[in-house]
Amino acid sequence: MTEPAGAAIAAFLAHLQGERRLSPRTVEAYGRDLAQLSEFLAGHLGRSPHLSDLSELKPADWRAWLADRRRDGVGPRTLQRALSAVRTFFAYARRRWGLENPSLALIESPRAPRRAPRPLSVPAAKSLIDEAGGEGGEPWRQARDAAVLGLLYGAGLRVSEALGLEGRDHPLPEALRVTGKGGRTRLVPVLPAVRDLVAVYVRLCPFDLSDGPLFRGARGGALSAREVQKTVQRLRSRLGLSPSATPHALRHSFATHLLAGGGDLRTIQELLGHASLTSTQVYAGVEASGLIALHGAIHPRARKAAGKGG
């Protein structure tokens, strides 16, 4: 336990690179985080730290380190990564040198703010589906792409849920039973327009759909999520949409547009299959910001106020 902390960190990084064969970039990130901790401890303790010092760190010491990082302007996600690097180093040091520090287990990772969904506008969502159905190529593949995107936007399905449908699920019912994350099953209404898109695809598809997946790739196997992503990338480029126009953004759009139309959060939670209402509440923030922007753009009093300010 008399090993200098710097030497122990160097041995750990060599282990990551030589034995675990992590990428140079990953090893470099671990090195930066651990070097910063070592630098902080040198100032905190008044001398270069040894392994014995690391074993004696108390919760207050760990919190002081995190607070120091925050004062440097480091955000929650970076702090999460740094704390993960420290935990990994301590696990290695425990195996190699018998280093123990129970206080580290008492430190919770900082919570990163949930990223707000970035839904598409109603015209953009519709144009993606329309463009998929009118794209050049084999008609059955055009119909397939339009049907898949229609299920994401019209029924709020995840890509995996849409691609998990079986041929025996056709014709789609008015309320589709879907099993999502965590094995949670929910009933999702399927709009007539979406059922029609799927029916057109089934009619044109050259493969026998009586058994196996409903949506097929070019050679008859199951359509992959990567193919759906590539299709949306191609379509958004053609339509001039932003990179945030992804397959999952169509599901975000489903929820946001329902909320804008008067839907309540509890109902939307059930339709999306969220285990917690907290996951659904992010859409309330998105819709609120949209309403504020709309108010500022069209409300007569808002326009007058802007004119006086000029």
Image (cartoon, rainbow, N blue to C red):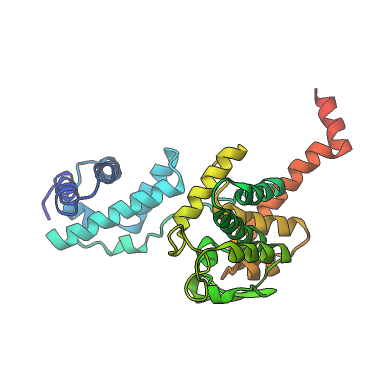
Depth check: 83 or 306 in front?
306
Q: Residue furthest top?
A: 310
The residue lying at 58 percent from left, 54 percent from top is 139
Depicted 150 relative to depicted 176: above or below: above
The residue lying toward the viewer, choosing from 263 and 7, is 263
Query: From the viewer's perspective, is 218 left or right of 11?
Result: right
Q: Residue at x 17, y 53 (%)?
A: 51
Picture layout, residue 300 above or below residue 23 = above
| Count of labels in the image | 0
In the picture, the quarter occupied by the N terminus is bottom left
Question: Quarter holding the C terminus?
Answer: top right
Q: Is residue 74 left or right of residue 201?
A: left
Measured as percent of width and height from the top left, residue 301 is found at 88, 37
Q: Position of residue 115 (x, y in %)?
A: 55, 51
Q: Where residue 96 appears, x then y in whole percent?
A: 13, 59
Horizontal arrangement in the rendering, residue 96 relative to residue 298 (left or right): left
Q: Nearer the viewer, residue 204 or 192?
A: 204
Residue at image location 67% in from the left, 66% down from the top: 195
> Where, by quadrant of the figure, is residue 84 drawn?
bottom left
Q: Is residue 56 visible?
A: no
- Point out residue 94 in the picture as x, y percentages from the top left corner: 18, 61
Regarding residue 143, the answer to whether it shows in the image is yes
Q: Is 238 located above or below residue 125 in the figure?
A: above
